[in-house]
Image (cartoon, rainbow, N blue to C red):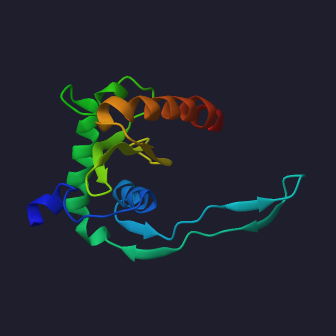
Amino acid sequence: DTYNVSIGQGDLLVTPLQLINYTTVIANGGKIYRPFIVKKIAAEDGKTIKEINSQIIEDYSSNIEIIKEIQRGMIDAVKKPYGTAYLLADLPVSVAAKTGTSQIESNTKINAFFVGYAPVENPEIAILVLVENAREGSLNAVPVAKDILNWYYYNRLIKSL
């Protein structure tokens, strides 16, 4: 069953939050941060009332060669014409991605997913798209991810320059 688990099949069960958190580990070179929803609480005038600091809960940066190999695979999924996320190759921001399908309810339902991060050179955003009752992440989840990443690029990255 090792083979099945290695490709995300069989008894491998992860939540979307776990999957996006693992994606950030790949993006940042090995650190697992405790997830949180609120980064900062601010008053109406913009003054910070409380800021939540990141907390590292595991560090796998000693496995950097393995992480770099996974990064290369995720980059190829976008840049190579045979990649399952090649639809993103023309985005104005570089993206690393993984697409797939997940089976639920004793394999009676299939969900399409996309997980990725951008920009590749200095990651700022990790994204997960899950489309329920849809096959193939490359056909169903990638177009949604493209819209989100386009919006992010033009409304967040460009404005911060």
Q: Is residue 107 above or below residue 49?
A: above
At 42% from the left edge and 68% from the top edge, which residue is drawn? 32
Task: Point out the residue furthest to the right here.
Answer: 45
Indicate left or right for 113 with 149 as reference.
left
Q: How many numbered discs, if any?
A: 0
Please tell me in which quadrant of the rendered image residue 114 appears: top left
Q: Residue 113 appears at what percent x and percent y?
A: 36, 43
At 56% from the left edge and 35% from the top edge, which residue is drawn? 152
Please tell me in which quadrant of the rendered image residue 19 appears: bottom left
Task: Point out the residue furthest to the top here.
Answer: 90
Instruction: Compare residues 121 and 54 and report the one nearer the observer.
Output: 54
At 22% from the left edge and 32% from the top edge, which residue is drawn? 83
Q: Is residue 113 above or below residue 52?
A: above
Please tell me in which quadrant of the rendered image residue 130 appears: top left
Q: Is residue 34 above or below residue 39?
A: below
Q: Residue 147 appears at what percent x and percent y?
A: 50, 29
Quarter of the rendering occupied by the N terminus: bottom left
Indicate left or right for 23 with 80 as reference.
right
Q: Residue 118 appears at what percent x and percent y?
A: 43, 42
Quarter of the rendering occupied by the C terminus: top right
At 64% from the left edge and 38% from the top edge, which residue is drawn? 160
